[in-house]
Amino acid sequence: MPWKLEDAKQKFSELIHAAVEEPQLIYDQNQLVAAVVKADVFQEFLLWQQQSQKASLASAFTELRELCAEENYSLETPPREDRANPFAESPHDLPL
């Protein structure tokens, strides 16, 4: 059942009891502003959200660094070699 914000405020306990049966949507000026659901549904949502969060690239590199430190592993990288950089040239020398 959709609720207007003012009605939801005035009939809060009725709103809570109705949420046991189905989610209750609250609108303010015809725009959805809140939904009231049973606590166990919300707990399931929180668990799903936590499990579905993707790790960032930064956290993946942090984990990799920790694993390398634990295994006493180091990555051999070749020395850097200078190469031509067309952006470092004068803009007047570049073809149009």
Image (cartoon, rainbow, N blue to C red):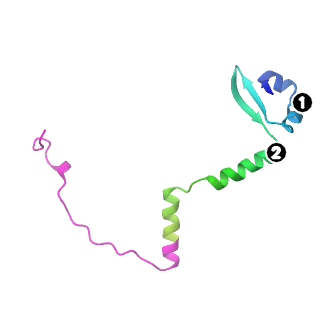
Residue 62: image x %, image y %? 51, 64
* Secondary element at image label 1: helix
Q: Residue at x 25, y 67 (%)?
A: 80
Disc number placed over residue 39 in the picture, else none: 2
- Residue count near mark 2 (Cα–Cα under 10 Å), binned few <14, some 14–19, many ≥20: few
Image quadrant holding the N terminus, namely top right
Tell me the amino acid under the disc marked 1: Glu
In the figure, is residue 21 to the left or right of 49? right
Image quadrant assignment for residue 41: top right
Q: Is residue 32 magenta?
A: no
> Is the magenta region chiefly helix, strand or loop?
loop
* Secondary element at image label 2: helix
| Range drawn in magenta | 67-96
> Of 86 and 18, which appears nearest the observer?
18
- Given the current orientation, which residue lies at the most extreme top position? 29
Image quadrant assignment for residue 37: top right
Tell me the amino acid under the disc marked 2: Ala
Q: Which residue is mark 1?
A: 14
In the figure, is residue 53 to the left or right of 21? left
Relative to 24, is 60 above or below? below
Q: Residue at x 82, y 45 (%)?
A: 39
